[in-house]
Amino acid sequence: MNTSFMPTLRQLRAFVAVYQLGKLSAAAEQLFVTQSAISVLIRQMEQALGVRLFDRTTRSLQPTQAAREALVVAERILRDVESLGSSFRDLSGLRRGRVCVAVTPTLAVFMMPPVIRRFAALHPEIRVVVDDCAPDQFMSRVIGEHVDFGIGTPEKMLADADIRTLVHDQLSLVCRPDHVLAGQRVVRWADLAGHPVITVRPGYGIRPMIDATAAGAGVSLNVVNEVSFLSTALWMTASGMGASIMPSAFAIHGAEPGMVIKTLSQPRVSRDISVVTKRGRSLSAAASSFVEVMVAVLGKAGARAQAK
C-alpha cells in the first residue's frame, strides 16, 4: 500500500460511477471517457491502496467490502467538491456575496443612495455594508482590509494604496442669486476678499487646502462661520449668512434649487473623488460590479449636472 497516496477527483468519480452502475462501459458513458480509461483509473486506485475494490465477472463488477467502506468517503468528498464549486459559481455569478465600502458621511449622503438602489436592483442577493468613517480613519480602513475598498478624497496617498478617479471635482463657491459674486462669469480666489464666507473648521477635511490656496492667492478670507458638516454650510448660505466654499460635487447634490455654484479659479483646486483599494489585493466579483455600477450612475449624474 502506498501510504502517501491521494486519489484524484477523476479516480474518485470513476470509482463511484463503477460502484453505482456495476459496469465499466456504463461508467465510461456517464463520465464521457473511454472504457479503458475507467479501467486504468480503478486499477491505479487498487494498486495504490493495496486492496481489490471490485471482483470482476464476465458480465459485471461486484464491489468488495473495501469498496463499500470507501464509497461513503468518496461520495462525501465529491459532494464537498461540488458544493465548493457551486459556491464559487454563486460568488462569480453574483448570486451571493458581500461588499463592504468605507466612505465619509459627507460623501455618503449624496453618492451612495442612487448607487445602492441601482446595485440592489441588479444584484438583490448581494449584501452591501457601508462603513461611514471619519476622514482621518478612511485610509486605515482600506489598508487594514476592514473593507473591500473606500470612496473618498484621501489627503495623503500611501505606498500600499491604489486610486481610480471616480468623479472629477473642484473647490467652488456657493452663494444666493442676490450675492454680489453670483453674476460674475468667473470667480477668482482674489474676488473673495472682504466677503463673509462659511467653510469647515480648521484642520478638518478641505480646510487646509482652502487656507493654503487663499494664502497663495494673497487673500485673507473673512470666515464668519466654521462648521463640521457641509450640509450646515449650505443651509447657512441659503439663509443669507454668507457664501460657502466646498467641493462642487457636494454643492450640486446638496444645495437648494436656485443656489449659484461657481468653480473658484486662479487657481482651480482639484478635489477628485476616487475609489481607493489596497495595492496587490484583487476585488471580488461583487465588489468589482459595485464599482462599475458606481461609475455608471455617478457618471450620468455628473453629465446631467454639467448640462445644467
Image (cartoon, rainbow, N blue to C red):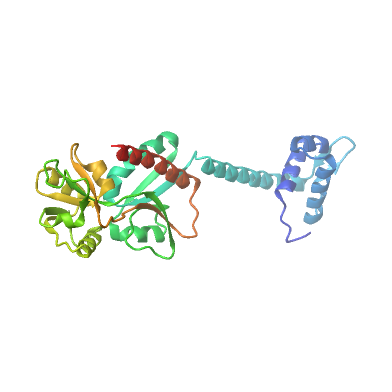
Single out the residue that lies furthest toward the right: 58
User: From the viewer's perspective, is 137 left or right of 61?
Assistant: left
User: From the viewer's perspective, is 127 left or right of 18?
Assistant: left
User: From the viewer's perspective, is 253 left or right of 42?
Assistant: left
User: From the viewer's perspective, is 249 left or right of 51?
Assistant: left
Q: Position of residue 235 (x, y in %)?
A: 15, 44
Nearest to the observer: residue 135 or residue 73: 135
Q: Position of residue 284 (x, y in %)?
A: 49, 49
**For residue 6, what is the image quadrant?**
bottom right
Q: Position of residue 36 (x, y in %)?
A: 85, 43
Q: Residue at x 37, y 38 (%)?
A: 300
Q: In the rendered view of the protein, which quadrant contains the C terminus?
A: top left
Single out the residue that lies furthest toward the front: 185
Q: Position of residue 213 (x, y in %)?
A: 23, 61
Q: Residue at x 70, y 48 (%)?
A: 9
User: Can see residue 227?
Assistant: no
**For residue 155, what is the image quadrant?**
bottom left
Q: Residue at x 77, y 40 (%)?
A: 18
Nearest to the observer: residue 162 or residue 305: 305
Q: Residue at x 73, y 61 (%)?
A: 4
**For residue 134, what is the image quadrant?**
bottom left
In this rendering, the count of numbered labels is 0
User: Can see residue 11?
Assistant: yes
Q: Is residue 5 above or below residue 175?
A: below
Q: In the rendered view of the protein, which quadrant contains the N terminus?
A: bottom right
Nearest to the observer: residue 285 or residue 60: 285
